[in-house]
Image (cartoon, helix red, strand yellow):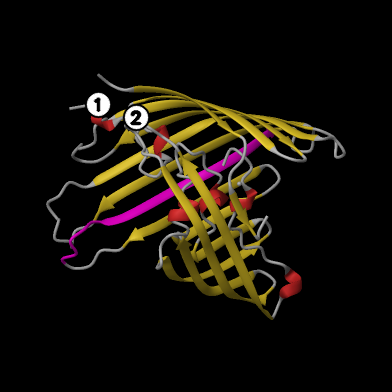
């Protein structure tokens, strides 16, 4: 029997603290934006970012096992601004889990960003994670901790009526006779404000898509099946903004129809196609943000999504 999952999720707070101050709940604290300030032209600066995390998911079910992640990540780097529209970052990322004597991640970081008039391009380490503004059925919130570095190319548009983030993340490079396939993810996250850009009541259309691919021709698994999995999401956002001095800052409703499609030449997944309905109601105040979410999924698979939203693959023989 196919497994149909209906879940009610209540998100009151995320136990993540960072020295920087985005996802359905405004997780700006998890953003990895690389701002450019014309005043910093010809300056070489030192930047230090830290993420202190405690994420505990007490799940008891066949889809995702419960886990606890507790520790910190450090990202010291040098930042150079050769002119008013280019930023170059060079540094390192270090993740340490409490209860583990060794560092979980030790990796160099490098990125070059060119930005002008609301358009930007990035090569190297991307503005990834929650900066993509993907919904969790498409993008795993745990990646902020477990996969903090995305590497490749990124193009962004940030205008009053349009937000667009299109990128490719080369996750695993293969070489001659590598015992594994190359692994690539690519996505686009777009939002078009169609009403009330400068008003208290706003309506926007979010469109999101992600492709995850295992492929290549030079590895030792050349006869293994290739895999291309696609997730798409579209919907409507309704937002009401309150006056500046109000305790309540915003009431917002985000509503998505989400799909999954297996575009592989040879299908090996439990399901070929699937879908989900994802509804969110957010209350943003001066002190705390409260969000209630509803998810109803059928035969839904998302290789980069938060696992709890997937359908039980074991239910199909």
Is 308 or 271 nearer to us in this picture? Answer: 308
Is 98 or 256 nearer to us in this picture? Answer: 98
State the image quarter where residue 239 is shown: top right
Find disc 1 in the rendering and name its residue: 315
Residue 176 shows in this picture: yes
Does 31 lie within the magenta span? Answer: no
What stretch of residues is rendered in magenta? 177-194
Residue 117 percent coordinates (x, y)? 69, 58
Residue 191 percent coordinates (x, y)? 59, 40
> In the orientation shown, which residue stands out farthest toward the right?
245
State the image quarter where residue 218 is shown: bottom left
Is 137 or 101 nearer to us in this picture? Answer: 101
Residue 165 shows in this picture: no
Find disc 2 in the rendering and name its residue: 311
Helix, strand or loop under label 2: loop
**Number of other residues with Cα within 10 Å of mark 2, as a class: few under 14, some 14 to 19, many 20 or more:** many
> In the orientation shown, which residue stands out farthest toward the front?
99
Q: What is the total number of numbered labels drawn onto the structure image?
A: 2
Name the residue: 49% across, 54% down.
Answer: 70
């Amino acid at each position: 029997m196919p497994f149909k999952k209906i879940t009610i999720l209540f998100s009151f707070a995320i136990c993540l603290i960072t020295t920087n101050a985005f996802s359905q709940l405004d997780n700006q604290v998890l953003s990895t934006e690389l701002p450019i300030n014309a005043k910093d032209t010809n300056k070489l600066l030192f930047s230090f970012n830290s993420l202190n995390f405690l994420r505990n998911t007490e799940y008891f079910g066949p889809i995702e096992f419960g886990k606890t992640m507790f520790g910190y990540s450090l990202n010291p780097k040098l930042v150079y601004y050769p002119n008013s529209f280019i930023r170059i970052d060079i540094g390192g990322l270090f993740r340490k889990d409490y209860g583990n004597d060794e560092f979980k991640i030790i990796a160099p970081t490098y990125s070059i960003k060119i930005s002008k008039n609301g358009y930007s391009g990035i090569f190297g380490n991307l503005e990834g994670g929650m900066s993509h503004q993907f919904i969790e059925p498409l993008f795993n919130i745990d990646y902020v901790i477990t996969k903090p570095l995305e590497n490749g190319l990124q193009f962004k548009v940030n205008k009053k009526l349009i937000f667009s983030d299109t990128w490719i993340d080369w996750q695993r490079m293969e070489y001659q006779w590598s015992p594994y396939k190359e692994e690539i993810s690519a996505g686009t996250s777009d939002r078009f404000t169609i009403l009330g850009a400068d008003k208290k009541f706003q309506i926007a259309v979010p469109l999101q898509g992600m492709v995850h691919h295992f492929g290549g021709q030079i590895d030792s698994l050349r006869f293994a099946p290739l895999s291309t999995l696609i997730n798409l999401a579209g919907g409507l956002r309704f937002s009401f903004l309150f006056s500046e001095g109000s305790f309540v800052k915003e009431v917002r409703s985000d509503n998505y129809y989400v799909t999954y499609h297996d575009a592989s030449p040879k299908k090996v997944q439990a399901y070929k196609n699937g879908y989900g309905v994802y509804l969110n109601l957010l209350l943003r105040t001066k002190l705390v943000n409260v969000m209630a979410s509803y998810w109803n999924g059928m035969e839904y698979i998302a290789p980069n999504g938060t696992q709890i939203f997937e359908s039980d693959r074991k239910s199909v023989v």
